[in-house]
Each structure stands twice: as C-alpha cells, then as structure tokens.
Image (cartoon, rainbow, N blue to C red):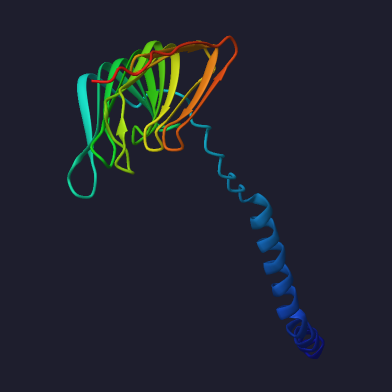
C-alpha cells in the first residue's frame, strides 16, 4: 500500500509542473479578459470661430528690422479669432509705409486683417489713399484714392481689388467701375463692368 502511494506520488510530481503552468496560463488569460480596455484618445474638437481676446480704443504698431515704423492699426473695437489668426476691427484706420517711406492709409466701418496687417478687407465706406511720392524707380507718383463699399488691400504688394463698384481718383482724373484690380508695382489698372472716366489735361506751370 505504501509502495503504491509512493509510486502514485512520483507520477503526480512528474505532471505537477505542467498542471501549475496550465493553471497560471488560464489565470493570465482570465486577467486579460477581465481587465477593462483603455479608452481610445478622443479626436481634438474642431476649432470654433470664436474670439479669444478683445481690444477697445486700441493702436497696434509693427516695425521693420531697422526699427522703422512699418504699419499702425487703430480702431474702436477689435476681436481676434485664433482659428484663422485674423483681427476683426470696427471703425478701422490703418497707416502703412513702403520701403520708400510713402504713406498709405485705409479707413472703413469694419475691417478684417491677417496676423501682420499686410492684407486688409475693408467693408462699409471703404477708402484707401496713397499719398504722393517717389516709386522704387525714383519717378514721381500722384496721389491716388480708392473708394467703395468693399476694398481688398494687399499692402506689401501694393495691390487693391474689389468685386463691387468702386471709384478711383488719381490726380485730377476720376474713374468709376463695377469691379477693379489695381497693381501699383506693375502699374496696371483693370476696370470691369460699366466703366466711366474723366481725364483732365495736364496744365503746364
């Protein structure tokens, strides 16, 4: 009897490691199945077109590398939208100087500018005035004025566009059109739609 028990114990001891490994494997499998899965990261919500800061009765100036005033933006109220990095301004007034220190001013009831104020959309009683001076070639340039309910000004490239009726006053000459694209650097003026113009002869001094 004792010999039989001894033989049975030896046989059991041979299979005991296998049995223990099986039990451990089943326990590990149960833990994996029972552990709650990690939640997948939620996608970032899309940026909403809402202002992140406001300004009232403000003036913002930018300068070039030499410390010279490049532009100044003023208004009664402004709202910055981070999703588009634009500034919406009420009763805006903008002053901009080119490399020859020639001044351009822009005014309107409302404006939308990009981050560095190099591109401005003017709405309501829009007006852009380029003061007389010398261009990059040293040639004298007359005073130019653009008027309309909408003007899109690109100050760095000296371009003004509009898909709405505009009026252009250059020296003593006056033009009106249904749309306009003016490139001051290339000296090209494109007027579209019903175009009317009044040219005054030069009067010798």
117 sits to left or right of 9: left
**In-front residue for pair 202/157:** 202
Q: Is residue 125 above or below residue 14?
A: above
**The N terminus, quarter of image:** bottom right
**The C terminus, quarter of image:** top left
Q: Is residue 128 above or below residue 28?
A: above
Determine the image quadrant of residue 194: top right
Residue at the far bottom: name it: 3
**In-front residue for pair 30/157:** 157
User: Is residue 166 at least partly visible in the picture?
Assistant: no
At 44% across and 19% down in the image, what residue appears?
A: 151
- Residue 140 at x, y percent in the picture: 29, 33
User: Is residue 52 at least partly visible in the picture?
Assistant: yes
Q: How many marks?
A: 0
Residue at the far front: name it: 204
Q: In this view, does 77 lie above or below 63?
A: above
- Residue 7 at x, y percent in the picture: 80, 89
At 64% across and 56% down in the image, what residue appears?
A: 31
Determine the image quadrant of residue 95: top left
Determine the image quadrant of residue 96: top left
- Residue 158 at x, y percent in the picture: 39, 33
**In-front residue for pair 79/159:** 159
**In-front residue for pair 20/115:** 115
204 sits to left or right of 154: left
């Amino acid at each position: 009897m004792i010999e039989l028990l001894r033989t049975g114990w030896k046989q059991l001891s041979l299979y005991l490691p296998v049995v223990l490994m099986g039990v451990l494997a089943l326990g590990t499998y149960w833990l994996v199945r029972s552990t709650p899965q990690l939640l997948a990261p939620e996608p970032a919500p899309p940026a909403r077109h809402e202002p992140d800061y406001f300004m009232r009765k403000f003036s913002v100036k930018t300068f070039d590398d030499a410390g010279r005033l490049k532009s100044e933006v003023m208004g009664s109220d402004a709202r910055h939208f981070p999703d588009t990095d634009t500034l919406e301004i009420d009763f805006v007034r903008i002053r901009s100087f080119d490399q020859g220190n020639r001044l351009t001013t822009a005014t309107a009831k409302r404006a939308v500018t990009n981050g560095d104020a190099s591109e401005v959309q003017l709405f309501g009683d829009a007006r852009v005035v380029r003061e007389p001076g010398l261009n990059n070639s040293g040639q004298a340039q007359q005073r130019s004025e653009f008027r309309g309910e909408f003007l899109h000004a690109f100050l760095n490239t000296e371009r003004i566009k509009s898909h709405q009726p505009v009026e252009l006053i250059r020296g003593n000459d006056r033009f009106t059109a249904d749309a306009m694209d003016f490139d001051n650097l290339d000296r090209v003026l494109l007027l579209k739609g019903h175009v009317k113009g009044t040219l005054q002869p030069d009067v010798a001094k």
